[in-house]
Image (spheres, helix red, strand yellow):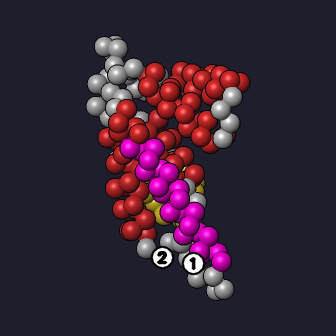
């Protein structure tokens, strides 16, 4: 599997997010995706038979991760909107420690960014041994449920998409 498919997905997402399908925007999306993939090329192999450490990029799984992100984005935005429009704000904000199953810098960074981009949560820090991610949530009334959501959602999809 070549990274060209991932680059195409990046450009498609860029065009969807910006809402502008012009030649200049397509070229800009292409250049940004090329730079982004250049930064992470050593983390994943493009299937070219090189020394990728057994890692393979699975485009269908990457698409599944992307769809999960958009689903979680919409659900979280809705939950936060409902929460803050109620007459009485009944939340328990806090920070919890999430034990990581992902191990590479790329996977940890991706997970932290997906958590941060989802309304109501924010990745705060990572432990020095890179085994614990600290997450701030707008409502920590059920920390175990929040951990399970991350474990069975973003983290599981990242491991399916990027681990060999």
Mark 1 or 2 closer to N-term? 1
Q: Position of residue 26 (x, y in %)?
A: 64, 26
On screen, residue 10 above or below 137: above
Q: Would residue 117 be found to the left or right of residue 19 on screen?
A: left
Residue carrying label 1: 91
Residue 92 sits inside the magenta stretch:
no
Give the extent of the magenta segment: 64-85
Residue 68 sits inside the magenta stretch:
yes
Q: CA distance from mark 1 to mark 2?
A: 7 Å
Q: Position of residue 93 (x, y in %)?
A: 57, 72
Q: Quadrant of residue 129?
A: top left
Q: Mark 1 near mark 2, Cβ–Cβ under 8 Å? A: yes
Outermost residue on the right side: it is 24
Q: Would residue 139 be found to the left or right of residue 32 on screen?
A: left
Residue carrying label 2: 141
Q: Which quadrant is the N terminus positioned in?
A: top left
- Secondary structure of the residue carrying tag 1 is loop
Q: Position of residue 33 (x, y in %)?
A: 57, 26
Q: Name the residue: 35% across, 36% down.
A: 60
Number of marks present in the image shown: 2
Q: Which quadrant is the C terminus positioned in?
A: top left
Crowd rating for badge 2 (residues with CA inside 10 Å; few <14, some 14–19, many 20+): some
């Amino acid at each position: 599997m070549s990274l060209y498919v991932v680059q195409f997905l990046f450009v498609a997402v860029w065009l969807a997010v910006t809402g502008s399908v012009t030649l200049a925007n397509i070229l800009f999306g292409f250049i940004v995706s090329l730079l982004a993939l250049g930064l992470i090329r050593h983390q994943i192999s493009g299937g070219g038979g090189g020394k990728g450490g057994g890692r393979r990029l699975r485009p269908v799984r990457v698409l599944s991760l992307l769809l999960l992100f958009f689903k979680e984005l919409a659900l979280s935005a809705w939950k936060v909107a409902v929460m803050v429009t109620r007459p009485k704000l009944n939340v328990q904000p806090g920070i919890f420690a999430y034990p990581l199953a992902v191990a590479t810098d790329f996977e940890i960074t991706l997970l932290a960014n997906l958590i941060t981009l989802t309304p109501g949560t924010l990745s705060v820090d990572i432990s020095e041994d890179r085994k614990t991610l600290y997450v701030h949530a707008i409502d920590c009334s059920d920390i175990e449920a929040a951990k399970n959501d991350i474990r069975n959602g973003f983290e599981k999809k990242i491991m399916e998409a990027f681990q060999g």
